Image: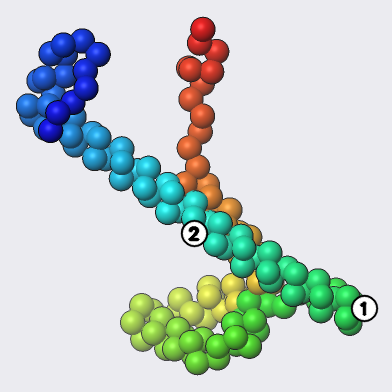
C-alpha cells in the first residue's frame, strides 16, 4: 500500500505497521454504513409518504379522518407474511415479544410508524458538521 504524505517520510512508520491501513479501512466502513442507514431511512420515508397519501385519499373519500393501522395495512398487502412473522417471532425469539410490543406497534398508524423508523435510521447515519473548519481562514 502506498500512502500520499504531506511531508516525505512522515507516514512511513504508520504504513509499515498497517495502522494507517486499518484506520482508512475503518473510516471507509463507517462511510458505507452511514450511506446504508440513510438509504434505509429514505426507503422508510418513501413508504411513509405513500401510506400518508393512501390515508389522505381514504379520508377525503369518507369525509372523516382515516388512519390505517400498520397491522391492517400489512394484512391487506400480504396476510401470509404477517402470520409467518408472528410464528417466527413467537417460536424463535420469545413469545412475549409479539404480544405486548409488536402487537402494540401494529395497532399504530402506518404513516407514524414508518416516519419514526425513517427518523431513527436517518439519525443513526447522520454526521454532525465539524465546527473547527467552519470559521477557519
Asked which colour scheme the image uses, the reply is rainbow
Between 67 and 31, the residue placed more toward the observer is 31
Residue that badge 2 annotates: 40
Taking the view exactly as shown, the residue that stands out farthest to the top is: 137
> Image quadrant of residue 14?
top left
28 to 119, vertically: above or below: above
Badge 2 marks a residue whose secondary structure is helix
Residue 59: x %, y % from top left: 85, 76
Q: Which residue is mark 1?
A: 63
Instruction: Point out the frontmost of discs 2 and 1.
Output: 2
Q: Quadrant of residue 111?
A: bottom right
Mark 2–mark 1 distance (CA, rounded to whole Å): 34 Å
Viewer-nearest residue: 57 or 94: 57
Could you tell me residue 57's position as x and y percent?
81, 75
Location of residue 58 (image quadrant):
bottom right
- Secondary structure of the residue carrying tag 1 is loop
Question: What residue is shown at x 43% (from left), y 49% (from top)?
Answer: 35
Q: Is residue 113 visible?
A: no
Please tell me whether residue 131 is drawn above or below residue 78 in the rendered image.
Answer: above
Q: Is residue 75 left or right of residue 61?
A: left
Q: Are marks 2 and 1 in contact (CB under 8 Å)?
A: no
Q: Position of residue 125 (x, y in %)?
A: 47, 46
Q: Which mark is residue 17?
A: none
Q: Seen in the image, is 82 located left or right of residue 16?
A: right
Amino acid at each position: 500500500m502506498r500512502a500520499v504524505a504531506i511531508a516525505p517520510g512522515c507516514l512511513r512508520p504508520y504504513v509499515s505497521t498497517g495502522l494507517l491501513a486499518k484506520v482508512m479501512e475503518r473510516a471507509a466502513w463507517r462511510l458505507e454504513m452511514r450511506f446504508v442507514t440513510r438509504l434505509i431511512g429514505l426507503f422508510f420515508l418513501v413508504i411513509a409518504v405513500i401510506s400518508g397519501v393512501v390515508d389522505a385519499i381514504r379520508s377525503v373519500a369518507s369525509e372523516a379522518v382515516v388512519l390505517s393501522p400498520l397491522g391492517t395495512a400489512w394484512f391487506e398487502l400480504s396476510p401470509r407474511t404477517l402470520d409467518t412473522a408472528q410464528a417466527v417471532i413467537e417460536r424463535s425469539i420469545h413469545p412475549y415479544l409479539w404480544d405486548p410490543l409488536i402487537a402494540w406497534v401494529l395497532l399504530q398508524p402506518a404513516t407514524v410508524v414508518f416516519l419514526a423508523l425513517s427518523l431513527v435510521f436517518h439519525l443513526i447515519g447522520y454526521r454532525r458538521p465539524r465546527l473547527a473548519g467552519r470559521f477557519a481562514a
